Amino acid sequence: MSALSALWEARSIAVIGASERHGALGRKPVDYLLRYGYEGKILPVNPRSPQILGLPAYPSVREAPQGVDLALIMVAAERVPQAVDDCVAAGVPLAIIASSGFAETGEEGAALQAEVVARARAGGLRLIGPNCIGAVSFNTRVLATFSPLFQAESVPFERGTLGFVSQSGALGFGAASLALQRGIRPGWVVSTGNDADVTALEVLCELAELPECQGLVGYLEDTPDIESLHRLAASGKPVALLKSGRTEAGSRAAASHTGALATDDRVLDTALRQLGIVRVDDIDELLDVARAFESTRRPKGNRVAVVTTSGGSGILAADAVERHGLELSPLKPESKEALGAIVPAFGAIDNPVDITATVLSDPSLFDRSLDVLIADDTVDSIVACFCVMAGADVDKAVDSLAKAAAKGGKPILVARTGADFLAPDAPQRLREADLPEYPSPARALRAAAALWEVTGGAPRDPVEAPAAPAARQPAAGASEPELKRLLAEAGIAVPEGRAVADAEDAVRSVAELGGRAVFKAVVPGLLHKTEAGGVVVGVTPETAAETYARLAALGGGVYAEGLAGEGVELLVGVRSSDLGPVLTVGLGGIFTEALDDVVHRLLPLRPGEGAEMLSQLRGARVLNGWRGRPGVDVDAAAALLHRISALVWGWPGDFELDLNPVRVLKEGAVVLDAAYTVSEGRKDSR
Amino acid sequence: MSALSALWEARSIAVIGASERHGALGRKPVDYLLRYGYEGKILPVNPRSPQILGLPAYPSVREAPQGVDLALIMVAAERVPQAVDDCVAAGVPLAIIASSGFAETGEEGAALQAEVVARARAGGLRLIGPNCIGAVSFNTRVLATFSPLFQAESVPFERGTLGFVSQSGALGFGAASLALQRGIRPGWVVSTGNDADVTALEVLCELAELPECQGLVGYLEDTPDIESLHRLAASGKPVALLKSGRTEAGSRAAASHTGALATDDRVLDTALRQLGIVRVDDIDELLDVARAFESTRRPKGNRVAVVTTSGGSGILAADAVERHGLELSPLKPESKEALGAIVPAFGAIDNPVDITATVLSDPSLFDRSLDVLIADDTVDSIVACFCVMAGADVDKAVDSLAKAAAKGGKPILVARTGADFLAPDAPQRLREADLPEYPSPARALRAAAALWEVTGGAPRDPVEAPAAPAARQPAAGASEPELKRLLAEAGIAVPEGRAVADAEDAVRSVAELGGRAVFKAVVPGLLHKTEAGGVVVGVTPETAAETYARLAALGGGVYAEGLAGEGVELLVGVRSSDLGPVLTVGLGGIFTEALDDVVHRLLPLRPGEGAEMLSQLRGARVLNGWRGRPGVDVDAAAALLHRISALVWGWPGDFELDLNPVRVLKEGAVVLDAAYTVSEGRKDSR
């Protein structure tokens, strides 16, 4: 049993700081454990009370009966180190520090937190928190929490299959309470506060390994670590994350264009998409997706059939299908024929299938239409929409849907736009039939899309970084000619070029390079050469000497290159991030800078991903030819991306590589400019 | 009293097709009127029953007592014409045709519908429907509907201030039932079905004129007419519309680039934004905005203060602020100072203001912080976030919020992320305190944004189209030289140019135009000249004769123009739409075509709107200079937009004017190419 599993398997729980006083936070966990029927040992710890709520209390956890699996520490911050020492001495494997007054309060608190973590680690004790509200397992009635949620008169306390993990305790238990109200059944709710030792993501990973856990949702404030994300994805369990702080993304100072484009938040978006983890933007969306995860049915593709009793709901559903990256199934001809025999003349047999309100007088319409859609293998999932229906009508619809759900393995989601007071039993009946329910077509479609996102995104095996740093990583401050040599060695095309020794050599170099050349100043630290006047295009033998003199005056060397042919320019860059190196590609110039038309991927690229990245640019048409202009060598551009990936993968440290522009020609692709920067210490992205 | 006001003022209602049979739709309205205490006369009409539910019934409305204000027609479609004739004969001003079997079923039904409308119009009878579920006024207990909503055991039937109007009856009453469940109080719910005579928008306009109506929400399937939108906006009442069918937009075949860019759906977006009408995408969003409309407080600007008891909620709120076009108020220094004395050290006094969970032990934190934010005039509205809190704690928070709300005129919206079972009275208490409540920060912020959208968007006075067509509208098939003459007369710069008579004249023309010229084929009907090889740039005296011969061979004339200077190219276009002529501007070439970076405005432009349009382009930096490149004459481009607006405003018919490109120079802006197309009949956008 791992230390963390005490959160759901603890047979003995110590509450350090327990109290009998009404209103005291320390009373609540003891009260909850008693009230909700925890079957293990409850050990209140309080030096001033021999007994709490009828249970014997102990002055210290050291003096409590041996074999404490979990300690909940609720004493004031300054007394936490002692409590941690006591836990270590008593051989407790896991403690939850609920107390506040640590890193969230400033430097002094951060120092205290570091001290506490150090003591725990030295003693083999894992810590959750501090500054959290604790954890609850609905399945085993481990309630190591003081959340006011459990003091309500009627809490729907049942077994559940979903793991809820939140850095914010208030938001986590708040969302969990809304989940309970909406008929969603969390099995575990864990708040992790400051994530000083155990992180929210580590808890998610542990929960993912429980066979009875069917899905996971998390609220994160810190950037997750990539290894845990890989572990989570590899578990095969569906996961949705709400990561706040989007608008603070991009706050890190960036040296290069690539750095400015690949903000932390976008990198996280990219990573989650690559790993098949759903990212949501709001609590409601998180709960809606969680509801869908409770069902075990998964789509085989992104094609949806909508069946509706109201034309209006059908149109809204169709609008949402496109918005969420799904497709309306075209339906097979035989399906349409079959539907034609079922659906009334004023309905619709194209998808969305509108069976009309006639279903009220003939409930078999629903059954028969659903049978057709379940048999149609161009349909991967079904969204059934109905509006205000009262009592028995809803029952009949639910019966049909339940029958259909039992038949096919396809996900069926329900949009019921009607109040619960019209059919008070409907939520319960839909839940029992394993049919996720939403109040609007758009919300049902969002959840359907999430099921495809977790299914279609192939969770990747974690990729190990090479053990030794790659031999070919440039030195900090490498010059453009040095970088281009490195690129050429890696099989990446660069223009023919050479250093220019003096004015005479300048004339000679232009002749050697074909009569016209580009001259560039090679000045250490000059990152934006063009803006500084350090690049001269179209140098001829006549202007060579004068141009050389002008560039040499900038204080460095001069480098001459041949002209590349006509083509389309790309920006290609790699920067390191908290999640590993990220490759960015965009169309050059204003496209990337003003329009943000860029695509990111965490390295290393898998086969086909280079071409995929290029095709995902909004301006991809520019590469393929448009308005009569010829296309360029997209294959060469894709190959270049793969070569860059292979070259850079494994470079350690914090760097930005900027190939801007890369010109994609009619045949081939050439790196025209390259820059490389290394930063010593990075601004912490938290 | 206008005919439509019978929907809320009828003193006498005839139900044509009334029945006493259990389960019959015709029983429901009579039942509802009796059950909910309608105080006027209920007149069941049924030729086969002398009495229905204890009320005397009549064989025809002609034989019912005089003075029927409203008839609800529920007979089979084929008997509707007779019922309409009867209503006309009885002098009924308004009938709701609930019956189906009209335009929604196909051609035959459409013909029947046209027949019915014709008879009604001839007889001075207004019609709602057909194919609708009727209407209800909660305030006067007029229930001319068979919606199953009212058969539920406990319907929260109270007075309300919001108008709900929906083309779809099922969706409209479904959304209304959800509204009731969520504590929102509709005063009127009207479904209009096929909109054959009275449209949903006309009902919204009539409701807007009721003093007791505080806000309106509508669900539309048909494109609204611009006059009604203007009337609605001019009412000053806040309005939110859910218009479905976004993804079908753009289905109209477009002759020009402008036509393809300014799709019906985008034009509607533009029109609604210009008029200060909120557009939403989902039922939930519609209800959330409706909830905010129930409060009468309005923001003076877009700056929000967020006060939260949970850091997590604060971050989520900040993310949503940016997403919805609002700003976080920076707060005045004296506010921060005051907050510093109130908020615990581990809280935050920057906006979002985190007063922390300490508020549980010291409820005055909420009061005092809110006082500071209300006094700060850099704060236009306040969003207060709290999470799971139980019973008395919620009460205290609500008390503070209610006190604060009573003090300032600022909107205060509440995000309470906690289940109702934790504080069963909270929804009611928040409602009584006029505090709109949402389950998540993001939803509260969306609603706060809507309040600013209806306040900040200045509803415009309707603009009358000139009575007579403008003299200068081009003829269908006008050639490029003709169009340019017209533009020049309107003060819009075009290149110097002239027709070329023959090969000899070609050489002469190049000389006259400065030694280099552009030659263009002038061929009637050739819209995409460039693609057809009909434009040759850089013609010199040497190549003039040969070029002339080549272009003349295309079958028309040849036109020579001088070269314009360097600059940035725009696409400028106008197309007529269901809502009037729309001006579109975008950066030229790939920017508009692949990236959709365009801005639309309904004509005529108001002062300043030209510059505003240009500044709203994502690629606006290209005009203002970027990466060391000089900017161009944005003022001239803006002036050109205003001249185009003045020129085109009032042109009748269905046309597309395409100025592509317009080159914006260092000084001035020149139209390089122009095309004009007229289409005879337009595809109906429905």
Image (cartoon, coloured by chain):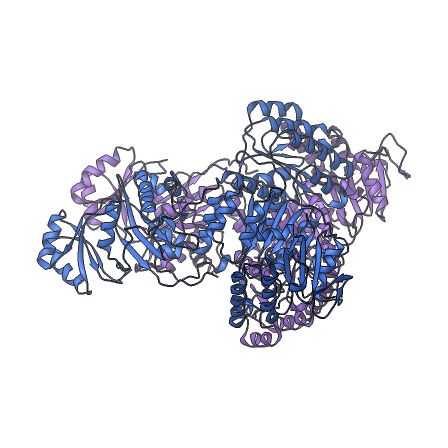
Chain colours: A purple, B blue
Residue A344 at what x, y percent from top left?
61, 72
Quadrant in which the C terminus of chain A is drawn: top right
Location of residue B313 with respect to B532 vertically, above or below: above
- Identify whether A17 is placed above or below B507: above
Q: Position of residue B52 (x, y in %)?
A: 75, 64
Q: Residue furthest left?
A: B504
* Residue shown at the point (11%, 59%) measured from the top left: B502
Q: Quadrant of residue A342?
A: bottom right
Please indicate whether residue A382 sits to the left or right of residue A319 in the image. Answer: right
Residue visible at 30% across and 35% down in the picture: A556
**A664 or B461: which is nearer to us?**
B461
Q: Between A434 and A205, which is closer to the camera in this rendering?
A: A434
Q: Let me know if residue A124 appears in the view.
A: no
Which of A413 and A269 lies nearest the eye of the viewer? Answer: A413
Classify A471 as above or below B303: below
**In this orientation, which residue lies closer to the viewer: B187 or A612?**
B187
Residue B516, percent from left and from top: 15, 50
**Number of numbered discs present?**
0
